[in-house]
Image (spheres, grey):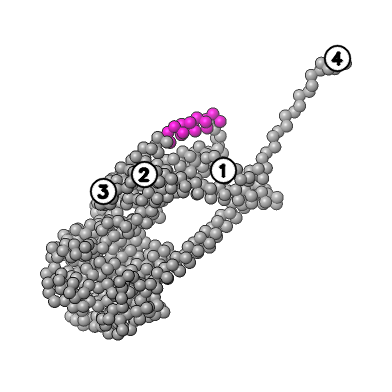
Amino acid sequence: MTDLLDIPAPRLARIPRPRRSVEEKTCPPLILRGLTVTGFALAAVFYCLSYTPSLLPRPYYLQGVVAGITAATGYGAGTAAGALTRIYWRPGERTVKVAWRVLSGLVPILVLIFLWLSTRWQRQLRVRLGIAPQHEYDLVRTVGFSLLTFGVILLIARALRLFTHGLAHAFGHVVPTNAAYCAGFVVVALLSYTAFDRLTISYFYTTADRSAAVTDSGTGRGIVRPASPLRSGSPQSLIGWDSLGRQGRNFVAGAPTERQLTAFSGRPSVEPIRLYAGLASAGTSQARADLVVQEMVRTGAFDRAVVAIFTPTGTGWVDNDVTSSLEYMYSGDTALVSMQYSYLPSWISFLVDRSKVTDAAAALITAVHDRWAAMPPGARPKLLIFGESLGTYGTEKTFGSAQKMVDGADGILLEGPTFANPVHQRLTESRAPGSAVWDPDYPDLPVAFASRPAELRDLAIARPKVVYMQNSSDPVVYWNPSLLWHRPPWLQNERGPDVTRDMHWYPVITFWQTTVDLVFANKAPIGHGHVYKSATVDGWAALAPPPGWTVADTLRLRALLDR
C-alpha cells in the first residue's frame, strides 16, 4: 500500500486556455482600451506639427481643433501601420515596455518645445498682419480643446469598432469568421455614411437654410427704403422693396450721397444708380436678369459713363467699399447692378450647388451685355464686371476662357478666386517661366495678377482688361483638397509677401491648417486673408480710371473708405 502511495501522480495534460469569445471581445472595455505604441507615437508627431504656422494666425480654440483632428488622424494611421506590422513581426513584451518608456520621456518634452515655438510663430504672424497678440493663458485653453477634440474622435472611432465586432459575432453564426468581419465592416461603413449624409449633413443644411432665410427676410439697422427712382425697391421701381432680400436692400441703400461725392471729387456729381433683384423678385434667374435690364432701361442706366455688373457672394452680399469706390471715382456717373442667387453663405453654396451662381452670373452678364452690345460703339458706356469669392467662379464659368473675358467687357476685376475657378487654374499653370504662382506673369493677354494692391500702380502692361487680386495669405485662393497629399507650388521656392518662411507642407496637417484658416479669412486686416475692401480702388484704377485719375487720388480714396 505504501508503495502505491509513493507512486507519483501522473502529470495532467495542460488544458489550452479557451480563446476569448466574440462577446468578450465586444464588451465596452474595448472603448476604453489603452493607446497603441505606434498610434501614440504618430499621434504625438502629428500633434506637434499641427502647431506649425500656416497662412493666418489661429485663435486658441481653432488651433485646439486642428491639433485634436491631426492627432487623431496620426493615431489612426499609426494604429493601422502597427496592425499591418504585427502580421509579419510581433514585438516582445519587453520591446513594447521599452518603447513606452522612451515615448513617455520624449513626447512631453517635444510637446512643450512645440508649444513654445507655436507661441513665437503665432506672435510673429500677428505682428506681420497687425493683429493684437494672444494672451499667454490661451495656450492652456488650446491644449484643453485639443485633448477634448482628440478624445471625442477616438471615442467615436472605438464605438464604431465595437459595433463592427458585434455585427461580426451575429454574422459569424452563418458565415466564416473572416467573411463575418468583412460584412460587419461594410455594414458599419454604409450605416455611418448614411447617418452622416442623411442626418448630419441634411440636418445642418436644412438648419442653415432656414436660418439664412430668416436673416434674408430682415433689414439691416439704419437701412430704409429709398425714395429715389434711381434705386430698385423705390416706389417707382419695377422691383418691390420686400423682394430684394437683406443684402439687396443694403446694396441699393448704401450708395454715397451727391454731397459726399462732390466733397471728394471737387466737381459736380450726380446721384448713382443702383439696381438689384432678389430671389423673391422673380421665379428664375433669367426672369430676374430680364427684370434688372428693364430697370436699367427705366432709370437710364445705359446713358451713364460706367455700367458695372456685380456677381455677389452666396448670401447676395456685395462689399460696399467695392461699389462706393467706383462711384467716388466717377462722381456718381455710374449704374451698378447685381442679382441674388442664394441666401446661404458662399462656402455652403460652393459645397452644395455651384450651378446657382453659374446660372445667375450667366443670365445677368449675358442680358446686360447683349443690351449694351446692341448700342452704337461710340455711345456705349464702359462695361465693367466684378466678382469676389464664389462670384469669381460664376463670372469665369460665364465666359469660359481668358480671351473671351478680355473681349467681353472693358474691364473685369476678380478678388479672391477659388481653387475651382477654371480660367484662373489655366492662367496660373501657363504663367511665364520664372514667375511665382502667387504673382504670375501672363504676357500673351492683358491680364494682371496682384498679391498686393501697390503692384497695380506700376504695371508692365499698358492697361489690363482683366485683373485678379489675390492676397498671398488668402486661404480661399490657396485651399485645395490636394493639400492632403501634395505639396503646393506656393510653398515651394519663393514665398508670397504674407507667407512666413516657417510654414512648411506636411501631409494631411497642412490641409487641416489651411481649412481652419478659412474660418478666420474674413477677419484679417485689409490686404490680408480674404479681406480686400478699399484695396479694390487699386483694381479699378488699373482697369478703368476716369480721365485725370492719379495715384494720389487712389491713396486719398482708400483713406476715405478706410475711415
Q: Amino acid at mark 2?
A: Tyr
Q: Secondary structure at mark 2?
A: loop
Query: Disc number at residue 137?
Result: 2
Q: Residues within 10 Å of mark 2 (few under 14, many from 20)?
A: few
- Image marks 3 and 4: residues in contact by CB distance under 8 Å: no
Q: Could you tell whether 45 is left or right of 10 in the image?
A: left
* Residue appearing at x 64%, y 51% in the figure: 167
The magenta region covers: 93-107
Q: Which quarter of the rendered picture does the N terminus lie within?
A: top right
The front one of 434 and 373 is 373
* Residue appearing at x 21%, y 81% in the figure: 303
Q: Mark 3 or mark 4, which is nearer to you?
A: 3
Q: Secondary structure at mark 3?
A: helix
* First in sequence: mark 2 vs mark 3: 3
Q: Mark 1 or mark 2, which is nearer to you?
A: 2
Q: Which residue is mark 4?
A: 2
Q: Residues within 10 Å of mark 1 (few under 14, many from 20)?
A: few
Query: Disc number at residue 32?
Result: 1
Q: Amino acid at mark 1?
A: Leu
> x, y percentage for residue 150?
47, 46
Query: Disc number at residue 127?
Result: 3
